[in-house]
Image (tube, grey):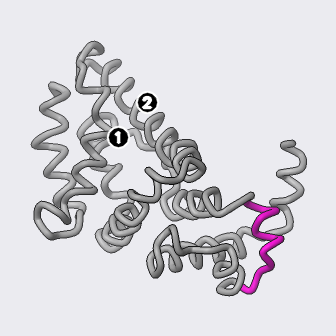
Amino acid sequence: MAEAATVRRSRITPEREAELYAAVLELLREVGYDALTMDAVAARTRSSKATLYRQWGGKAELVVKALRHEKPITSDIDTGSLRGDFHAMVRREDDCHMEQNSALMRGLATALHGNPDLLRAFREWIIEPETEMLREILRRAVDRGEIRADNPAQDYVLHMMIGAFAVRGIVDELPPTQDFLTSYMDAVILPALGA
């Protein structure tokens, strides 16, 4: 199976893959997940539907991998302090990308609840890698003595981060920004962790 996946992937260059992902995200912003079709992606990218299905299996995997491509996991965050690591996480994206990704996430929220394939792919390609990265950052903070190993807030850091990112537009009618998320981490997450 892994060999078949490697053979399939070798047919599309990294540049072409990036171009396809960009088109998928553009369509997603325009029409939303439910109205996005493989026909539309094929037309927009001048690809065959057969190639898209062979490469990604379906719409859910294609959309989630496009999201992951837009925001790759940077597992090399290690500034030597929990606060520094959290701030480095926020700086992975500039304010413009955060606003675009916030809009995408709002658009996907309903679709995630109604589509088991999308939810499964989203958990595998977005949530689980982000959770593992956070666990590693928190493990290092525990090892350095910055936070207690038994602090229950550790289980909710991802929830707090996603919450701040997702609801800024609803509560303040403003997009999430680096300054807002950095202040939120300093005022809410770090104190909850006892750091």
Return the residue at label 2. 136
Q: Is residue 143 left or right of residue 177?
A: right
For residue 112: magenta? no
Image height check: is 68 above or below 86?
Answer: below
Residue at the image point whose x is 23% and y is 39% from the top? 83
Return the residue at label 1. 79
**Numbered disc total:** 2
Q: Quadrant of residue 77?
A: top left
Magenta stretch, main secondary structure class? helix
- Which residue ends up furthest to the front in the rendered image? 114
Label number found at residue 30? none
Q: Position of residue 89 (x, y in %)?
A: 35, 49
Q: Position of residue 8 (x, y in %)?
A: 85, 59
For residue 50: magenta? yes
Q: Position of residue 52 (x, y in %)?
A: 76, 69
The region drawn magenta spans: 46-56
If you read the primary sequence from the N terminus, does the residue marked by circle 1 or circle 2 appear first? 1
Residue type beneath disc 2: Glu
Q: Is residue 62 left or right of residue 143?
A: right
Image height check: is 116 above or below 105?
Answer: above
The answer to which of 172 and 138 lies nearer the viewer is 172
Quadrant for the N terminus in the image: top right
